[in-house]
Every structure is written in C-alpha cells, then in structure tokens.
Amino acid sequence: MRSSSRRLFLALAFCSSPAASLLASDFIVAPPFSIQTAVDAALANSDPFDTIFVQPGTYPEMVTVDYTTGVGAPQEALAIVRNTSTRPKVTLGFVIRDSRLVTVAGFKVDSIHDDGLAQIRIQDCVGVAIIDCRGTNGDDGGVHARTTHEVIVRDCLFSGMESTPGTGIGIDIEDRCAHLVKNSVADMNQGFGIWVQADSSSILKCRTNENGGGGIFFKGLQNGIKSCDANANGADGIDLVGICEIKNCSANDNVAEGIRYGEGGGVQYFGGLIKKCGTTGNGSVGISVRSDQDGVAVIKNKSKSNGSNGIRIASDRNQLIDNTCNNNTGDGNGIVVAGGTVGNCLEGNRCKGNDGEGIKINGDSSFLKLNRAKESDGIVEAAGALNNEGYGNVADGTNDFP
C-alpha cells in the first residue's frame, strides 16, 4: 500500500488538475516509473527549484537533464535525490547539459561499458553538484565534465574505471573555473584518479590510490589541494602545473615521483606552495619542482626513502625552508639544486642518511642558512653558491663552499 500511494503521488504530479499544481515542485519516483519522465515533467512546469525524490530500485535508463528541452518557463534549479537511505541504481548513466543549478545525489551509477563514455557526463552548464554517488567498476569513466562552471563532486566513489576505449579516469573536469572535488575516492582506475584542468578550483580530502595513470593531475591558476592521499599509483602521485598551493598531502609508494610540480619546458609560471606534505618510498624523486615553475615555496615537508632525491629543484628563486629529507636511496641526495638555476634559498633543512650528498648545489647564486646534513657527504659541490660561510650550516662531511 505504501508503494501504491507513492506511485499515485507521482501520477498526480503529472496531471494538470488544481490539486496537482500544489505538488508540481516535488516528484516521487518508484519502479516501474521512469526518472526521465519526472525530469521532463519538472522542466515542463513553471516552478523553480523542483525536486525529484527517487525510491530504491533499478532504473534501466539514461537520465538526461537539458533545460533547453523544457516547454514551460526556463528552469531555475533541479535536484534529483534518493528518497531513503537505500541507494537507487541508474544503469545507463546521467547526462546533464545546457542547464543551471542541477544536483544529483545518492545514486549508484552505471552506463554502457566499452562505449568510451563516462557514467555521469556534464556539458555546457553552470553549477552542477554530484553528491554521494557511487560508480560501477569496469566502466569507461566516472564523472566527465566539460565547458561548465562550478562543478562540485563531493562524498563520491568512482573507482575501477577502464581506459580502453574510455579515459579510465575516476573524476575528470576540464575548462572553466571554480570547481570543487571533496571527500571523494578515486582508486584503481586505469587512467588518473582525479584530473582537473581549470582555474580557481580545489581538491580537498580525497583518496587516489593504485591508479594506473597517476593519482591526481591538477593544472591551472589559483588552485588549491589539501589533505589528499595519492599512494601506490602506477606513475606520479600528484602532478601540479600552474599556480597551486598543496598542503598536508601524502604521496607514497608511487612508481615514479611523489609530487611533481611543473611540466618541464612548458609555459613559465611564478609562485606556488608545497607545505607539510609527506613523500615516502616513491620510485623516483619525492618532491620535484620542474624548470617551468619558478618562485615556489617548499616548506616543512618530509621526503624519505625515495628511490632518488628527496627534493629536486630545477627552477629559479624558490625557497626551501624546514624540510626533512632522510634515507633517500639510489645515489639520491637529500636536496639537489640543478645546474642552470639561479637564486634559490635553502634555510633550516635537515638531511640525514641519504645515499648521495645531504645537500647538493649545482645552480648559481644559491643562499644557504642553518641547514644540517648528517650521515652523508654533507653540503657539497656548491661552486655556484654565494659565500655561505658563517651562516650556521652544519655537516658531518665537508661544507664545500667557494
């Protein structure tokens, strides 16, 4: 009887009687009714802020939200949400395009496998929120958003996506700005876990482990990433390009580098922050600042037991302050400043037990103050450094300043 009453409620919402008009902004859907029918009805009425409540069950359909198809007044906002604690399943995915202020919350989502398309596709919108959704393993992608402002992906899980013929990316957002990915998991995808290429965006408290293409790729201006894990990925843990602040993140046991900032030879950027991050057991460098990323502050990070250098700097005018770089192997140095660089400042760093030098300076006009290098070859090959004698640097080996 309860199920019948809800279906009756849905039927009343679709009719044009005065009684139904009172219910026009709320719809309840239960099998065998279609979510798409409720979406079409919402777009056809004249009420803003409509909500579609979806009962548990399996919905074998592709749900398409496109405000340009509505025959009534332009839609202001639409929410499609689960109605109980049990998660409904949509088997052919969601498509959201040419729309404004759309929320999809609380669904299990699948789509056709091996068609190269993601489970949730967003195009040419403003303000789309994907909340508390779960993808299905083996599909071609989780969330795929293009030419859309303000995409939010929160409390979601999109794992196990395959890259043939799709992208194999858990959460993939490109273009426009002001996106947020928060409290979400993107593990064991064949591509990247999270890929965001946009400005003024944030990735917060996310987990991206065991992805084939790398954990996180983040490119753009005025971006921020905080409290994320990118561990045991098949390439780099976290790739950053542009101007970004990264704080309190872990990038451990990745096949290549832990945190890589810059593309090396791309567009030249100035500014950025890497602070209080941990990089342990990566196959290559723990933290790498590439040649096209100048003026980066690298502060209070811990980089240890990596297969190469703890921190490698290949650009100009960076500040390395209070970092700890211990027990890096493969002839790796604790910190190395590459040749051809200018004006790097190292202060208060601690390097211990590295296979190579504690701190190795190959660039010109580097300034060192209050650094300590123990159980290694000290602070050496500083031929291009400034006169750093008397600035409190201490080494078990030789401070080889000019």
Image (tube, rainbow, N blue to C red):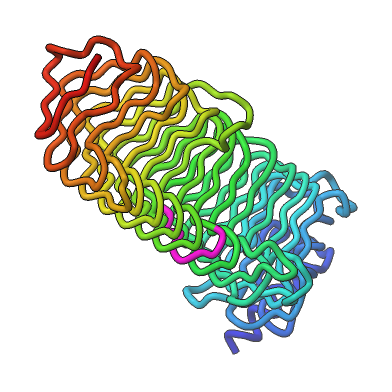
Residue 92 counted in the magenta span: no
Of residues 282 and 179, which is closer to you in this image?
A: 282
What percent of the width, then of the height, locates residue 289? 44, 34
Q: What secondary structure prevails in the magenta region?
A: loop
Horizontal side, residue 341 vs residue 127: left or right: left
Residue at (52, 29) in percent of width and height: 291
Of residues 67 and 242, which is closer to you in this image?
A: 242
Q: Quadrant of the N terminus?
A: bottom right
Residue at (21, 23) in percent of width and height: 400
What percent of the width, then of the height, locates residue 160? 56, 72
* Residues rendered magenta in the picture: 206-213
Q: Is residue 236 visible?
A: yes
Q: Is residue 382 above or below residue 78?
A: above
What percent of the width, then of the height, locates residue 133? 55, 65
Residue at (48, 53) in percent of width and height: 236
Of residues 12 and 296, which is closer to you in this image?
A: 296
Q: What is the tally of numbered marks visible in this picture? A: 0
Can you tell which quarter of the image residue 264 is in? top right
Can you tell which quarter of the image residue 385 is in? top left
Can you tell which quarter of the image residue 379 is in? top left
What percent of the width, then of the height, locates residue 161? 61, 70
Q: Quadrant of the C terminus?
A: top left
Of residues 191 and 196, which is closer to you in this image?
A: 191
Residue lying at the far bottom of the rendered structure: 1
Q: Is residue 82 visible?
A: no
Residue at (22, 18) in percent of width and height: 401
Q: Is residue 45 above or below residue 2?
A: above
